[in-house]
Image: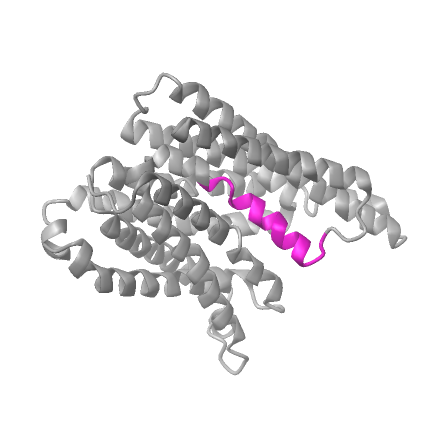
Amino acid sequence: MTLYFSMPAATVLTLLAAAMWGSWMQVIKLRKGYPVEGIAFWLYVFSFILVWVVTLFLSPFLLPEGIFAASKGKGRLIAEILLGGGMMSCGLMFGLTVMNQMGLLLATTLSGTITSILGIVTSVYKEGLPDSPRAIPLIIVTTLMFLLASFICALSSKMCAVDQAEAAGQNLTEVKKPKSPVTAKLLLYILLNAVLANGWSVGTATGTAAGFPPILTCAYLATGSLLGILLLCTVLFTYKKMWKTVLCIGNSKRPLFLSAISALCHYGGNIISIYAMPTLSATLSFLFGRTSSVWTYFWGFYYKEYEGAKKKTMRVLAVGLILYFCALGLLFLYNYG
């Protein structure tokens, strides 16, 4: 197995990757009417370019035998990594749709729970459990803590919206009800998001468990992500006649710049995480990556999204964040205790 980093370095880098994952979606707040589907499309186009530039630059140092020689005879393995990348990008597209229609709380509770469980199961299935007898209790407890923390933080976000509406004298009934009714179509989107988002674990755990060089795992995952989003968006943009808008023809090119920043954070984080993954294991890396949500709330503070929230709401948020850090503490205790 190819190891690029020591355990302490891999841990720090994985947490850095989580911070980048928790930051990339902030550009959506700055899109000014540009379709979110367009952001997702360009995100993976720029990610593909970024990853392959990094791969071609580093391959003489990290892969002296060459890309083609290292890939020879690995067709089935590469196909599975490509599939994981395609699932991941399509899952993101469905996830944005679910979040837009249902709101963060329900989207996080339903699809986030399924995705987390699938991610852990997939990672363990691909590479097996660590040898330590503490591994199973650790995985179960930290997974449950991260799920509970995610729900509590999302609940605080919903409570904050109610607090702000009440302070502004708005109708609280309108604020509290879901953005859209939960229809069969929306439930299908939730299921698709949950299953397809597991592509990250499918692709990365496959490469890590097989001892495939991380530099190539990442490159083929990005390739799969591009192929998946191209296939989905070609149909979607053609059907909705969105190509002119998405390509920014006759309009500001600002969305392209925002998408490039997203790619740097999203797949830049993926590069760091995948390169560090063989040292940690895919399972522990997945758990460390759950801390990405914490950064979403830190950005919320920066944008003053909790301004006007009541003390009760802030206490709920504090409980959620503390749970995140407690789960992270358990991971550190397992690795270094």
Is residue 325 positioned above or below 228 on the image?
A: above
- Pick whichever, 193 or 290, lies toward us: 290
Query: Picture coordinates of residue 6 (x, y %)?
Result: 30, 42
The majority secondary structure of the magenta stretch comes to helix
Q: Which residue lies most toward the bottom here? A: 250
| 241 within the magenta span | no
| 304 within the magenta span | yes
Q: Is residue 269 left or right of residue 329?
A: left
Query: Picture coordinates of residue 78 (x, y %)?
Result: 21, 46
Q: Which residue lies most toward the top here? A: 133
Magenta part of the chain: 289-305
Q: Is residue 246 left or right of residue 302?
A: left
Identify which residue is drawn at 37% across, 47% down.
Answer: 273
- Pick whichever, 32 or 311, lies toward us: 311
- Pick whichever, 122 or 67, lies toward us: 67
Identify which residue is drawn at 30% across, 38% down.
Answer: 279
Identify which residue is drawn at 24% across, 43% down.
Answer: 3
Q: Which residue lies most toward the right here? A: 169
| Residue 299 seen anywhere in this rendered image of the structure | yes
Is residue 34 positioned above or below 162 on the image?
A: below
Give the number of marks. Answer: 0
Query: Picture coordinates of residue 290 (x, y %)?
Result: 49, 39
Q: Which residue lies most toward the front here? A: 337
Tell me the colour scheme of the image: one colour
Residue 303, picture quadrant: bottom right
Quadrant holding the N terminus: top left
Quadrant holding the C terminus: top left
| Residue 170 seen anywhere in this rendered image of the structure | no
Is residue 216 positioned above or below 240 on the image?
A: above
Identify which residue is drawn at 29% across, 51% down.
Answer: 218
